[in-house]
Image: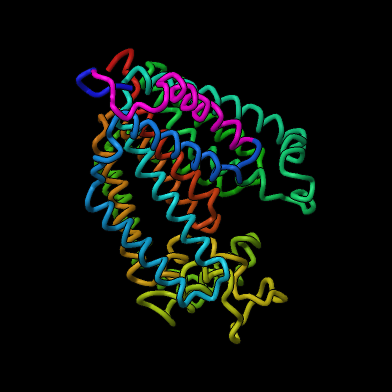
Amino acid sequence: MTRRDGSPSVNATLPATLLATLAGVSAALLGPLVGTAPRGMPVWLIVTTLIAAAALARSGRLATLRPGRFALAAGGGFVVLALASVAWSPSGRALATTLEIGYVALGALLAGSWIATLSEEEAGRLARLFVGGLVLGIAAFTIEDALGHPLHQLVNGKAAYAVDDSNVPKRTAVLFALLVWPAALALHRAGLRTAALALPALYAASCLLQSSRSAMVGVAVGLVVYGLAHASARWVSRVLAVLLVVAFTGALPIALFLERVLGLADASWLFTSARHRVELWSLAAGRALEAPMLGQGIDSSRALKIAGEFRRFSVDDATLLPLHPHNAYLQVWLETGAVGAMLALALALLALGGTRRLPADEQPYALALFAAALVMVSTAYGIWQAWWMAGILASGLMLRLAARAPRRGRA
């Protein structure tokens, strides 16, 4: 790597070819890793962050990073709040969770900054490797699903399949529901417009054969938003912004309304897991109201004890919730209160605002990714699970990478 004026950097401590090779391996392995061992995503993120840091140091840019002040204030403020809340959190993993949030935030800063320095040619090379690996990973996962996931069992251990409807392939499914959108953007910029739409559409069809309802909903919402954004990306962005504000500011009253007023936890026409989620959301909202400003402490969702609440599901558990409330907005409220919710909302709005900097014909891909993430974090996994945070960030990083690749074909 060289400086912008073409002169070699005085910090050139690693050969450029080595860094380029490592970056290529990282991009190519993302899809296969998600397809076989999704809980390995934190390792991928850490390795990618180290590659980014080395590349930035080699070019002399590491010491001159200038992150956006609003993103730095909101992100830094949230990490500080999480760290402070370790003092009152009942969870024994509170500090570990805060450290995981911290290295994901560091990865966003360093890897995002590094991608922004890549030339079009290098970004295009990495984007092609990413797309190739993703297609391979999805194809292998689809075949695996038909065969009962023998490779997943080999990699993750048969104990992961001791019960029916294992979470291991579900994790893979939701991550692919995000990653198809940056891959589609990369195909779009390469001039392969038909393939760009075919990839998420074919993955949506494959989801019908899988067990993850969250992935089905996520990719379906992404396709709908993609179509609407072609008509007016500006209005879709505005609607998503409104939904974000409603999700964060209205999380508690909405959760209580669904259970205490509409009685959906007792609705026989709903499938059991949906009824269970309604109950979990109501329980989480009730506890959040006990500490509305700063919350119960980071990671407290897994450690809150029952205090006389009536529960229809999981009545034998000693803790109030099964690790998390299956809703990111409620989890942020429960653990970090109104302060954390407003900081998280600010970060989400900044991320959404970033989609407007893309060319008009590329914004539908970014908005589809954002909408898919928006809906899946509201129903699926605990937002602080390291593999989930790393996967969401990876999709954002790959979107940024695809947006730097050369544009070919018609404008």
The one nearer the camera, 153 or 371, is 153
Reply yes or no: does residue 301 show up in magenta.
Answer: no
The one nearer the camera, 74 or 231, is 74
Q: Residue at x 45, y 70 (%)?
A: 335
Looking at the rendered image, the quarter that the C terminus falls into is top left
Q: Is 246 positioned to the left or the right of 257 in the image?
A: left
Reply yes or no: does residue 20 show up in magenta.
Answer: yes
Residue 156: x, y in percent? Answer: 72, 43
The one nearer the camera, 323 or 46, is 46
Residue 269: x, y in percent? Answer: 62, 62
Residue reaching furthest bottom?
308
Residue reaching furthest top?
409
Residue 296: x, y in percent? Answer: 46, 76
The one nearer the camera, 245 or 160, is 160
Q: Is 203 positioned to the left or the right of 140 in the image?
A: left
Residue reaching furthest left?
5
Q: Residue at x 66, y 28 (%)?
A: 140
Q: Is 285 positioned to the left or the right of 124 in the image?
A: right
The answer to which image quadrant residue 58 occupies is: top left
Q: Is residue 78 above or below residue 337?
A: above
Q: Residue at x 33, y 52 (%)?
A: 348
Residue 275: x, y in percent? Answer: 60, 65
Residues rendered magenta in the picture: 7-35
Coloring scheme used: rainbow
Looking at the rendered image, the quarter that the N terminus falls into is top left
